[in-house]
Image (spheres, coloured by chain):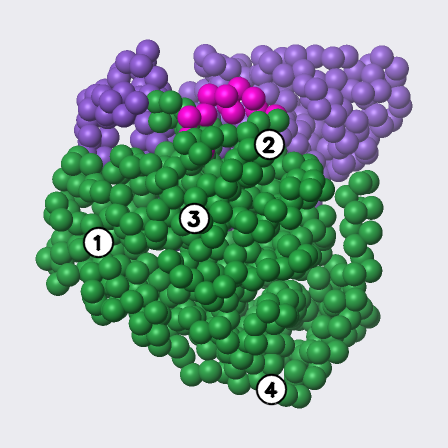
Chain colours: A green, B purple
Amino acid sequence: MDCIISIELGTNAVRVYAFDLKGATIAFAKGSYPTFHPYPDYSEQDPEQIFITMLYVLKNLLNEKIHSQKHKVVSICFSASMHSLLAVDKHGAPLGNVITWADSRGQKEARALQDSPMAEKIYGVTGTPIHPMSPLVKIVWLKNLQQDIFRQTEKFMSLKSYIIQQLTGACVIDHSLSSATGLLDIYKREWDTTALEYAGIQADQLPEPVPINYSPGKLLTQYRVSLGLPAATKILVGSSDGCFATLGAGVWDDYKATVTIEDSAAVRVVGTSVLIDKKQRLFNYILDDTHYVSGGPSNSGGIVFEWFAKQFGDFKDAYDLETCMEDLMTEASTVDPGSERLLFLPYLLGERAPIWNAHARGVFFGVNINHERKHFARAVIEGIMYQMYSIEKMLQEHRNIKQISVNGSFASIPFCIQLIADIFNLPVSASTNASSVSMGAYLLSATDIGVYKSIEDAARSVTLSQACKPNIHNNNIYTGYYSVFENLIGKLGPDFEALARL
Amino acid sequence: MQIFPHIVSIGSKKNNAIQLESFHESIADFIRIFSIIDGKYEWQIRDEQYQLYPGDTVLVLPGRRLSSIKGFLEIGTIAWVHLRVERLDKGDFIAGEWSSLSDSERFTIGNILLSNKPVIRSRTDETSRIFGVLRNELFNHEIGFHTRVNQLLDELLVMITRQLTKQGNPGRDFPKTFLQLEQKLRENLSHQWSVEEMAATVGMGTTLFNVKVKTYTGFTPTNYLINLRIAESIKLLRKPELNFTDIALDTGFYSSQHFSTTFKKLTGYTPSEFRKKGSADS
């Protein structure tokens, strides 16, 4: 049987899926790698460790579940987290670790760019909000503070570009990832001269931008032989995880949006036009030749509930976080909507959209003498969802969203699905696939070999679960709480700054 | 004490009055274990200052400086055991031949004591209980006391080691615990880590450790470590001045042959092909 392989280079782990040509998962394996924080603002990963982990996981999966079943691999498609930056010298050797999306060392550089007259132009042309996550800002940081590394850098790569270069020799970056660097003109699809000038680099110091269905060539012989793959196996560069998650959730019409909640989170829409936001709160990333994915990212996803569980949950067995979280979730579900007048702002890690405030912090508001742990647990979950709703509200200024499709491990929990439906007052369906990101990779690969006529056809083939309908009574309650939530954010702005200065 | 040459001193002291200049800075070539029974103490171990309270156990390793911040011994009661150990090169040490722990256990315990904080905060006060039993055994000389005393010393070392590692890893956040281990592995990649040693370093039993590592990383601990070794060797292969044997030993392989086989099995390249590929790219 022919099969399609998807390799997701995620934030914490590489996940490899094998699909048959109809899109059913026939094999899965993952291997995780750590993120290092040598200083509090830093988030780095070891590129060779990721490469070796990927190779090991892929090889085992092929040997144990693909070759042994006589399946034939038709193509391999990649996806990766956005905003990563890896400086590489003239011999192709990394100059240090990969700087990930979560790294905020460039706060000063981001602020300087925001305050400059270039900000509006660069944001408008590149579609990437000006923030420390942006590779543009990271390069400026290197230029200002690590001049040695900056001078020695032959190429500023993304993690995925580096991995693909190791495997095939080609130095490329797909349009989706490149449109999240703050350096690409998302209309012309070439590196933007203004942004390059601001970063102090030349276009040839970046990989070549290519469409997501571009093939960078064959695997180098040794890798191909070692993996036991036929010479005809096609490699597709693929997309970013965010764009694939949206495609894989079957969102194609402009009245639909996806809510993705893993550790971090995002609300996204798809369309043929770029959404122009005067306050520069939205991203616009390239999906394919005609479509853009627009939306807002949040730091405050499942990681916030995990924090709560780790600190305040019961651990019947050491390190059994899953059971601990399930128990808390069950406790939370016994509390009425609104958590009996307890509200939570989930900004433990600062926040991106829509407030874009790195100094925002978590707040419990309205604590009274009758509140128990279960109220706090529910307030935390409701707070995460109010935050998601604030991004969706911002998108409603541009689109008339009538339907939500959720994916990601946290958003797909039935209790969370109902909360989203009630808070957003919209019908919510869940992806039936284990991973929307890899489903997206499958849809692209399957279209490439002619299973679907177009990406659009492929997106429409995605089946979703029966929609969960909003409860009007609960929605009324949440609407009241949400307005307090919104007020609090506005009022606390100066105090978040004051706290950061202490 | 002639039958216990490794016990330098054991005792307890109730201090009723302050004697100025009574506590001088000292460095010993044996382990000093103190149990705080009563009172409040301010001591300095190496360059760190510690406030000590009843129930705390203090561990001053060979060669480490101990002093009192005020220069005298505060009012209260403390008990101690001073224990001679075998010093190895590189500053590490192991319990002597009197111990019935295995070689690798003694080695691991030595490493864990070296790399953790020197104070255990505890409400149960296991240390002073063991001290009490030890003193009774040494005083009474009942049948079997020779074996019993050495067993109690082993028990003391094991208890302290377990409490130290558990203190840093409360059993909630596995990713955080695992990251601590990863950093220790990277700092000492050339060491021949066993799974028991990796587990003990983060205060876990081997059974739970194996399960958790597999679920969290997707690899067995041994395979995870092999990946780390190979990833590090790739970086070293890019440095033309290093030879394969050095790279192999630095990254924890037994020999350049072992390195070459493992490297080829995973990547399809031998180390020398990989190095040539790297220089051909540029």
Q: Are marks 4 and 3 on the same chain?
A: yes
Instruction: Residue under label 3, please give it.
Output: A189
Q: Which residue occupies 57% across, 27% down?
A: A143
> Does residue A158 appear in the picture of this structure?
yes
Instruction: Residue under label 2, please give it.
Output: A141
> Does residue B259 appear in the picture of this structure?
no
Q: Say which chain tag 4 marks.
A: A
Q: Which residue occupies 72% across, 73% down?
A: A482
Task: Say which mark, if any, is on residue A471.
Answer: 4
Whether pointer 3 and pointer 1 mark residues with C-beta atoms closer than 8 Å, the reply is no
Identify the amino acid type marked 3.
Arg
- Pair 4/2: label in front: 2
Q: Which residue occupies 33% across, 36% down?
A: A171
In the rendered image, which quarter contains the C terminus of chain B?
A: top left
Q: CA distance from mark 3 to mark 1?
A: 25 Å
Q: CA distance from mark 3 to mark 2?
A: 25 Å
Which residue is more in the foreground, A390 or B131? A390
Q: Are marks 3 and 1 on the same chain?
A: yes
- Secondary structure of the residue carrying tag 4 is loop
Counting from the top left corner in percent of width and height, residue B144 is at 47, 31
Q: Say which chain tag 1 marks.
A: A
Identify the amino acid type marked 2.
Trp
Dividing the picture into quadrants, the one containing residue B82 is top right
Counting from the top left corner in percent of width and height, residue A290 is at 40, 61
Q: Which residues are magenta?
A: A145-156
Q: CA distance from mark 4 to mark 3?
A: 44 Å
Q: Check disc 2: other Cα within 10 Å, few if <14, some if 14-19, many if 20+.
A: many
Q: CA distance from mark 1 to mark 2?
A: 38 Å
Instruction: Residue under label 1, please give it.
Output: A75
Counting from the top left corner in percent of width and height, residue B140 is at 59, 30
